[in-house]
Amino acid sequence: MTHKVLISLGSNLGDRTLNIKKAITLIQDQLGDVIAISKLYETASWGYDDNSYLNNAICLVTKWAPLDLMSSLLEIELKLGRKRSDSKCYEARTIDLDILLIEGLVIHHHKLDVPHPRMNLRRFVLQPLADIAPDWVHEVEGVSVSDLLLKCEDQIDVNLYGEIPLYSS
């Protein structure tokens, strides 16, 4: 069975653009077909003070089961230098990969919650999603990504930074 998955990418350490490009390449090479890539956006760090982030989103078509997909995304983070701590505080990272939505699925598992439980609160997540999937209906809220963006109360500035072209490996 294939799944259409929306994934958020972010980086605020090192060469942020290169970190995101490398993550997309690894996802494309290992996990399925990346069929859409949003523009890159720059935002201040959210939840703490540090370097600004680059954020974007991709749409992946994959045969991987959701929990296996999440495990593989965590391995990609590790490969790209992400160091996770046991702290519950937000911290800088070379790469952050989050599954936001999986078409037609709702998952509540200790390793994965889909839809992502905080995506509606974060303009830096919703803006890139609106680039590639404005009409995708949130499986729990029942409204489109573009409507979620319009309703989002987060006032963080989300500034267009550039683009990463869609390519095939």
Image (spheres, rainbow, N blue to C red):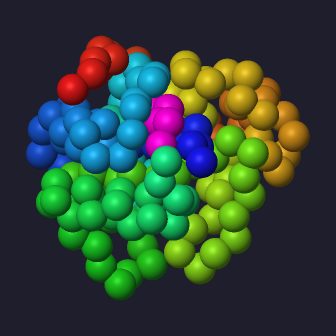
> Which is nearer the eye, 47 or 146?
146
The residue drawn where x is 75% and y is 45% is: 104
Reply above or below: 118 against 120. Answer: below
164 left or right of 125 in image: left
Residue 23 locus on image (x, y percent): 25, 43
Q: Confirm whether the magenta stretch covers residue 60.
A: yes
Left or right: 80 in relation to 90: left
Q: Quadrant of residue 21?
A: top left
Give the residues in magenta. 56-62
Q: Is residue 101 magenta?
A: no
Q: Position of residue 153 (x, y in %)?
A: 72, 40
Q: How many marks?
A: 0
Q: Left or right of 126: which side holds 120?
A: right
Residue 45 seen: yes
From the viewer's side, name the closer residue of 49 and 168: 168
Q: Quadrant of the C terminus?
A: top left
Please, which residue is most extreme toward the right here?
A: 142
Up-down relation of residue 124 to residue 47 (above or below): above
Residue 43 can be seen, yes or no: no
* 71 vs 99, nearest the viewer: 71
Q: Residue 30: horizontal and vertical position, in percent?
A: 28, 47
Q: Residue at x 36, y 25 (%)?
A: 40
In the image as oriented, which residue stretches furthest toward the bottom?
86
Query: Residue, x 57% and y 43% (percent of image)?
Result: 2
The kind of secondary structure the magenta stretch mainly shows is strand
Picture residue at 39% right of the left edge, 52% below the top: 97
Q: Position of residue 55 (x, y in %)?
A: 39, 36
Q: Residue farthest to the front?
A: 1
